[in-house]
Amino acid sequence: MDMPIKFDTHQYIRSLIEAGIPADQAEAQALALSHAMAEATVAPSELVLLRTDMTARIEMLRADIYAKLDALAVGISAKLDALAAGISAKLDALAAGISAKLEALEDRFNAKLEALEQSMRAYVDRKFTTVYWMLGVSFALHAVTIGMLLRIMDRLP
């Protein structure tokens, strides 16, 4: 029997006999122990093979996980881009609506301001018409007064 771990059965039997165990029992124990060690232990070469196999499986799993993570990142990036485009479109529409409302408000404000300006001009023109008449009458009276003064002065010696 080929044993993966070194085990000297003769030395083991001698140790048991020296300890006071009968030779038949010592041989039986040595035989049973060698069978148990042959079946229950793993050879270093088997461990190397197992390690190589596990390393390969881990690398395959790692590559699979990285591929799935990359695909997930691409999917998330695409969804984020679509979401950003949607938000941008909504913001543009909102800005256009606000701009249109501001322009309408500005037009109404300008129309009211223009109407107020025309109303003020008409009011001022009405007031100045009266002032113009009063000034005209005043100048006429002054002219008459000056004319009369000149006549009076002409009659004076």
Image: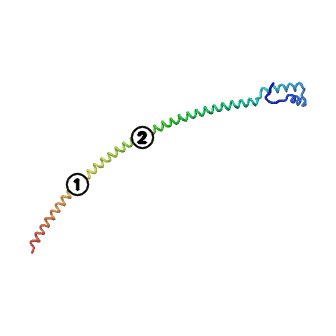
SS class of the residue under badge 1? helix
- Residue linked to disc 2: 92
Image quarter of residue 3: top right
Measure the alpha-carbon separation of dots 1 and 2. 48 Å
Question: In the rendered image of this protein, does residue 130 appear above or below residue 87?
Answer: below
Where residue 57 appears, x then y in whole percent?
A: 66, 30
Taking the spot 84% from the left edge, 25% from the top edge, the residue there is 31
Q: Nearer the viewer, residue 34 or 152?
A: 34
SS class of the residue under badge 2? helix
Where residue 64 appears, x then y in whole percent?
A: 60, 31
Taking the spot 89% from the left edge, 24% from the top edge, the residue there is 24
- Residue linked to disc 1: 125
- The residue positioned farthest toward the bottom in the image shown: 157
Q: Are marks 1 and 2 in contact (CB under 8 Å)?
A: no
Residue count near mark 2 (Cα–Cα under 10 Å), binned few <14, some 14–19, many ≥20: few
Taking the spot 48% from the left edge, 38% from the top edge, the residue there is 84
In which quadrant will I find the C terminus? Answer: bottom left
Question: In the rendered image of this protein, does residue 109 appear above or below residue 137?
Answer: above
Q: Nearer the viewer, residue 43 or 147?
A: 43
Question: In the rendered image of this protein, does residue 124 appear above or below residue 88?
Answer: below
Q: Nearer the viewer, residue 84 or 115?
A: 84
Indicate the colouring scheme.
Answer: rainbow
**Is residue 120 shown left or right of residue 7?**
left
Image quarter of residue 144: bottom left
Task: Indicate the amino acid at tag 1.
Answer: Asp
Mark closer to the chain start, 1 or 2? 2
Taking the spot 45% from the left edge, 39% from the top edge, the residue there is 88
Residue 35's disc is none
Where residue 113 appears, x then y in whole percent?
A: 30, 49
**Is residue 126 shown left or right of residue 93?**
left
Image quarter of residue 52: top right
